[in-house]
Each structure stands twice: as structure tokens, then as C-alpha cells.
Image (tube, helix red, strand yellow):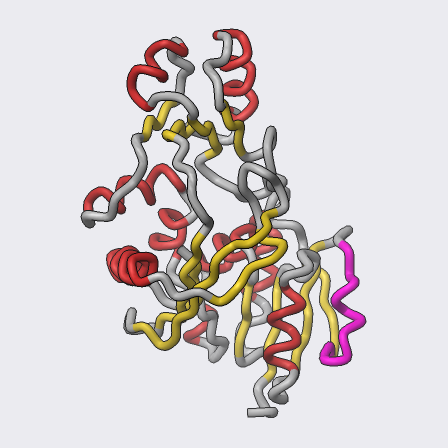
Amino acid sequence: MSGKKILIVDNDPPFALSVIRSLGSVGYSLHLGFSYGSYVFNAFSKYCKGIIFYPDPSYAREDFLSFFERLAGKYDFIIPTTEKTQLPISMIKDMLEEKGTSVPIPSYDILKNAVNKAKMLEICVQNGINIPKTLVLTEAPKIEAVVEKIGIPFIMKTSTEINILPGPQNRYFVFKEKPTQGLFLAAFKRLQKDGPVILQEWIDGVGIGASFIFSRYHKVVAYFGHRRILERFPDGGPSVIAESYLYPDALKNGVKLLKALKWQGVAMT
């Protein structure tokens, strides 16, 4: 196992450190990739054997793709940890694997749907998975029409999270009382720059997550569940404290959704 050479991409987010520690602790030779100008704190991990810098795909996608095409065959695995690099690398996944570098993520055609929240809601409906009352809009309606269709309170959110900071006013707005048309329109326009805007009824409850590893043949290899105890933001966001928790419906619907996508690799639903 220790002979395998792995390149982990997108190491500026702190959660990439979990991947580094997990793989490094069992003897893999880990090299870390950073986009130019990003923080390199994870490079100080005792498991890091080397680092490389690559063009940022947000601004130089063609240069990014050319860079990674030249890495084909130089690593046993390339593991991109965020959608920012997963999407472009998925476009050259077949070429990389033909030359001996495994990339444990889905193909581009699958991944482009997975990072689109509006598309995922559509796929949920097609596969009998319940979703809240939902509107997917490209133009702002009258607030009265929104209240009539999905009620109060409701959440307004972006249809993608790529390159958008987490939290309220970046990825979403929550309206627990009916807003004025002016306030509603200002929030809509702020999110609209990142694509179609999703409006959904607000459902009180506890945040539940189901995580999976799927094989290249779309079979469940492992699964895990968690329940959020504390989130970074009061109205939703990344977990600050969570506990292990297997919720049967979350596991069942997560498997159903990921099989419908023909998923491979890791995912959380």
C-alpha cells in the first residue's frame, strides 16, 4: 500500500487535512497540490512528501487542464477534494486513467448535474424522493406569488456553491416573515448572478447527513451518517459539532439518488 503515490488537489480548505491524515496514516506517499496564491498550511503536515502549484481553474481553466494532462501517469491517484477542481478534472478523467492515474470521481456528465441544485431537485422528483415545496426561477416574481405557492417562512438560495463563500447573504437568505418587495428583489438579485435562484418552504428540524463510498460499478462500498448538533450559522451551514447517527430514510434516499446518478467515489447527501 505504501508504494502508491497520490496527489491531493485543493488543499487550501481545512477539511482536506482529514484526507491527508487518513491516507497518510496508512502509508500512502502523499503529494499536495495548491492553486497559485492559495494558503499552503496543509503542506506542513508530516505526511506531505512534496507540493506542486497549478493554475486556478476559476480563471484559467485551459491552463489548468493542460497542466493536469501532463501529470498523467506520474501519480497512481489524483484526488480533487472540492467541486472547483473536480469538475475540470472530470473532463480529462478517462485520459488520465488510460495512462495509469486513477481519479476516484464521477465523469463530467454526472458531476455537472450533481453540483447543480436545481437539477438535483429534478432528479429527486423523478426518483420518488420527497422535496420541500420549491420554485426554481430566473426572474424575480411578486412576493405575493411566492407566499401563495410556498408559504412563510421560506429560504432563497443559489443553485451552485462553487466559488461562493458559505453562509447567509452569500449562498442563501432566510425569510421568517413576509419581506417587502424591495427587500425580496435585492436578495434575489444578489443570488441571481450565480444562476437560477431556488426558493423553498422552510422546514424546521435537525440536520441529518448520509455519506457514502461508491465503487466504479455504482455499488455501495461503505456508508456513514451524522446528526448536526451545532452549525456555523444559525440558519444552516457547515457543521461545527456533529455526532454519528444513522437515519434509515437518509441512507435509503441517499443510495437511491446516487444510484440514479450512476455515482462513483465519495458523496454526502
Q: Which residue lies at the image location 57% right of the left edge and 86% below the top edge?
A: 4
Out of 5 and 92, give the one closest to the viewer.
5
- Range shown magenta: 39-48
x, y (%) of residue 11?
A: 67, 62
139 displayed left or right of 42: left
34 displayed left or right of 192: right
Out of 247 and 40, give the one closest to the viewer.
247
Q: Which residue lies at the image location 39% right of the left edge and 41% below the top edge?
A: 117
Q: Which residue lies at the image location 67% right of the left edge and 67% below the top edge?
A: 17
x, y (%) of residue 55?
A: 67, 53
Q: Which residue lies at the image location 60% right of the left edge and 82% below the top edge?
A: 5
Q: Quadrant of residue 152?
A: top left
Quadrant where the N terminus is found in the figure = bottom right
Out of 62 and 124, give the one closest to the viewer.
124
Numbered disc total = 0
x, y (%) of residue 84?
A: 56, 51
Residue 262 in view of the camera = no
Out of 198 and 177, give the one closest to the viewer.
177
x, y (%) of residue 208?
A: 43, 54
31 displayed left or right of 100: right
225 displayed left or right of 190: left
Quadrant where the C terminus is found in the figure = bottom left
Q: Is residue 99 magenta?
A: no
Q: Is residue 57 above or below residue 191?
A: below
Residue 84 in view of the camera = yes
